[in-house]
Amino acid sequence: MVEGIPLLEVTILIPLLGVLLLAWIPEDDPEATRAATLALSLMTFLASLPLYFMYDVDAGGFQFARVYNWLSPIGAQFSLGVDGISVLLIVLTTFLVPISVLASWKGIDKRVKSFHAALLLMEATMIGVFAARDLLLFFLFFEVQLVPMFLFIGVWGGEDRVRAALKFFLYTAVGSLLMLAGIAYVYVKAGHTFDMVAISAALPGALSSTEQFWVCLAFLIAFGIKVPVFPVHTWLPHAHVQAPTAGSVILAAVMLKMGGYGFVRFCLPWFPDGLVEEAGGLFSLASLMTWLGVGGVVYGALMAIAQTDLKKLIAYSSISHLGLVVAALFAGFTNPNFVEGGHARAITGSVYQMVGHGLSTGALFFLVGCIYDRRHTKKIAELSGLAKPAPMLATCFVIAALASVALPGTAGFVGEILMLLGMFENNVGAAAVGATGMVLGAVYMLWAVQRVIFGPTEGANREVKDLEAVELWGLVPLLAAIFVLGLVPGPFLARMEPAITNLAALYGG
Amino acid sequence: MNTSMIPLLILVPFLGFLLNAFFGRRLGKSFVTCVGVSAPLIAFVMGAALFSNLREIDSRPVVQLDADIQRRVYDAYSGELARYELVTVHAHGHASQRQILRVDLPYESFVQDALAKNLITQAELDDAEHAEPSERVIVAAGEVAPAAFTFTLGNWFSVGGFEVNFAFLLDRISILLVLVITGIGSLIHIYSTGYMGDRSAGTFARFFTYLNLFIAAMLVLVLGKDLLLMFVGWEGVGMCSYLLIGFDYDDKANAACGTKAFVVNRIGDLGFVLGMLCLVVLGRQAALGELGDGVFSLDVDFLRTLVDHGGSAAAAGEHGHGGGAAGMIGVACLLLFVGATGKSAQIPLHIWLPDAMAGPTPVSALIHAATMVTAGIYMITRLSFLFIDAQVFGIPVLGIVAVIGATTAFCAGAAALAQDDIKRVLAYSTVSQLGYMFLGVGAAAFGASMFHLVTHAFFKALLFLGAGSVIHACHSQSMSKMGGLKDSMPWTFKTMFVGAFALAGFPLLSGFFSKDLILFQVLARSNVEGASWVWALLYGMGVFTAALTALYSMRLIRMTFYGSYRGSGHPHESPWVMTVPLQVLALGAVLASLLGWPKFFLPASLASWADMLPHSLHAVVAAGPTALMDHDYLVSLEVTGIVIGAVVAVGFCALGFAWLWSLPPSEIAWERPVGWMRRLRDFLFRAWMYDEIVNKRGAQPAVKQLSHWLWRWFDDATLDQGLVDGMGRVGVELSHMARATQTGRATSYLRMFALGAVVLPLLAILATPLFTLLTAWFAGGGTH
């Protein structure tokens, strides 16, 4: 009975049609626009739930798959399907969009309709990125979602929004160009097909290890910029600082994960030899990514400590957290005595942390937005003692901060402990460096809490109003999800397991 | 016994937390009081019920069986219900290691089952029950090893063979901690209703919300059977401690102290995590090798089998002599100990505890004296089988533990002597006493350390609550603003007097027996071969610190309660909700000694009371090298130790009296801000300047400077504005240059056209040969 319903297509179409629907709402009725967008995004969320619950764990592989004719002359098809990893990221996306609507309920009051149209377009394309089973289609979605985000930052952003938007766009465009070249090469070598399953079957045999090295490098740079990995991260702080709250939430929670998803989907399975090949006998791409990753953990944390802008601090904390996520994906290959189980655990933790980080950082950006709406500043020095006038806001902030430092019981802990464990099994040094994030994270996060939430309440901080119902409706599910994923990770992990076991087994022999 | 009471034990304070968190502010103080106080009380009653259940099972018969029956039983139940264990048996005053067979069945069901399965006949059973203990084999079915309850709530997560369960273990070690946490916790909750009584309803609710959450987290810590679950509690209590230290957050300093506590604890936790990772890797190797089922975890039982197999694997394994598994266990234990130094405030991570005094005083009593800070000692005791033989580069890890413990005990004891803030005296005293416990643990005297943990919980909670009562009355924490309070605060005075003497180790009070049991074990250890001079030195340090303890305890009583009042206002006794807990705790500080009276102190009729608590733990913790020493010699050492301890305590209490009582504080050289002692006192007042040099002038500015510098000059200037924007500028410049060619003048275009007309055909002609040449060159290179 379910087979009859094209669930994936519906999930993409609801927000897409929603963009058209918004056109019918009069421009002078922002409330109706918000309500309609909220309803549409909730419908999308509901539509995506069956994907998650009906995903057959025992069968594994791509499910809900459908193929439509698209550019048949060159072999590109409109082909969709999800596996245990992408279904999780899709639900994360559909879960966060309604929350983003609530997050911008008060903050956005100009061009309300265009804003929400862009948000819905972004949702459709983000789902598309995770659902595409065709490489060209993936690229299409990957590129199209840049546009609404570019507009988000450029139109609804802060004072320096245009520069930030441009930097974001150009950075990503450079990566995309390299990826396009890589896609073209893969397309030719894999026998003129964009079908990911077919390519997976054809590669890596179709490429020599040197070819793999270069194509893989192109993909690594493209997705590395997206994550972003140190040292190509400098667009992120600018983009976050300028972006409106919803933009930051989506950017941190979902869009950055596309980089990690790209690593998992393409780099790991397709270019195994390229990753371990030692360029000039010096280092392999895998060890490069591993050490850039754990280096980024320390570097991002140090940068976060130095920040005076609360939003920038959280942006740099993302770089630190995602450094570990990246390192965990590649650390396995740096061990000559590859431990397959450890590699699988590290990848599992990494994907889990993508979700966990999405939730905790999403919540933090949401809360910074709430603070900004009230105080019109994000400068840490101007904020102090918010706990007194706004206890609920303070409580939520402290919970989100503690989730961000991966306190046991939160989603971040499960992800982080699995990543560290898996890395430790294959590369003790990288795991040890990465683990210092535990301490450094506490330094910048709690220092920020100490200065912003605690301390004496003076001046305009006294007038800060506590969270309103609209904001609570967004925050409470977000924080609840952090604990659900932290305490009952079983079902989520079970869905990922087959995909990741296959991935790790590629190298087992 | 319904073991599901174990998670309920945790659930009760957790429910208290939820109720207070969501409804406390709205429903007011009486609701909060009711919920907040009843939660730990109910948990205490449940803990007591579980305790009596454990005791009841332990009192069931032990059966001696012949070796062949034993083997039959083992074969029948092997793997699941039956296993051989090495235990230390104390018989006829001698300790010896024996192998027992333990069957995890209640005695009655075992008998029924064994009879049904023909493992044993009724006649054999009757014989066995009357048999004398055989010297050669201890053969037991039922529960020779003490009873323990386990309960598994479910799976937390499992990835590729690595399993983490919500599994709880209630045995003799954890029940002890459960009773301390809920019992002393309840008293502190009651006290807090008075201490925090004048706060607003919201603040009052917040306080009890955190306090109940703390109790729940602490219970998770001690009941967690899986190390990772223990870590949940471990970090959970750290979080509560963080929130409670910065409870009065509108003072910047308090919030900073909370952050400091959390960060320093996190450094320890990093060690804890890395230690766990070592154990998991070891577990995986074993699970894929000799243990063979591919499932591995951080479950205490699994770790125990791991250690049992680890010895043989290391001897025969591919890693050579003593390396491999055994070496890994050593590293793991050292890293876990780093975790312990963080939570239990030992050198080098002790710096957070004195600052933790920023929290309300009941918090200091509960978290920073009685319970949380002892977690490190508990963890090592729980993992004693792991630590007992652990070595790093040939140095026993427990030796390192002992050295750190003794050093911390001494340094903190000296620092306590120079403090003016009454809470800081007690804070350094706590660090010092925890040092004693680590010294004991290091000497493999786990029972003695747990005994000291219990007695210390009583008298230190008492002293903190007493100090709270004094602070409540004087509105100051500075002892130089106190004095002469013994008449205006009679109950606070009397109870604190008892507490201070118990702390000083005055004969027959609880601190006397527990501290001297530790010191005696260290003394005994110095009589065992292997680095005996180190242990003798540690014993000396321990005795010297005992002298310091007596001195600073007397100083505290003197400065607070004697002489004339130096503060402002008219201090008066605290309300009964505060003094009654003090009285109960004072009673405990005296009576807790009954848990460990030495044998030679007791008449023969009461011999079963001797060393009750430490002995009860012998069967569940690993035995150290002193366990097999000659009994009479041990007794003589114990007598010597006790006598030395008594002489030191009495002597230095008397000295404290004589020195401090003779003059008003302003005229005692030690207390005055001038004179020859000033430098030494100042140095000790600043706790050996360690925090200032290492933290305030070392790590903190270093990290801040480094991050600031990196951000300003590397991230912003070099990477972003230099490289990235630079690339953009290069692009813009290039386009400017290219634009310069578009002059719009026909002559320049013609020149370009002419140039193109020559160059392009040339290129076209040369392209093919050039390409062939290049390919040939590459191909040639390839064939080499």
Image (spheres, coloured by chain):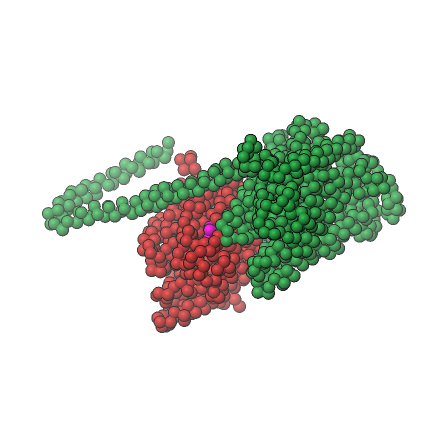
Chain colours: A red, B green
Residue toward you, B218 or B551: B551
Among all residues in the image, which is located at the extreme left?
B747
Indicate left or right for B61 with B385 as reference.
Answer: right
Image x and y of residue B607, in percent = 82, 40
Indicate left or right for B507 with B92 as reference.
Answer: left
Q: Which residue is painted at 53% across and 48% down in the image?
A: B258
Image x and y of residue A69, in percent = 39, 62
Image x and y of residue A400, in percent = 50, 55
Which secondary structure dominates the residues rendered in magenta?
Answer: helix
* Residue A283, quarter of the rendered image: top left
In the rendered image, the quadrant that contains the C terminus of chain B is top left
Indicate left or right for A57 with B499 as reference.
Answer: left
Examine the rendering and report whether any part of residue B354 can be seen.
Answer: yes
Q: Which residue is painted at 84% across and 38% down in the image?
A: B134
Magenta-tinted stretch: A448-452
Tally the numbered discs. 0
Tell me if residue B531 comes above or below residue B10 in the rendering: above
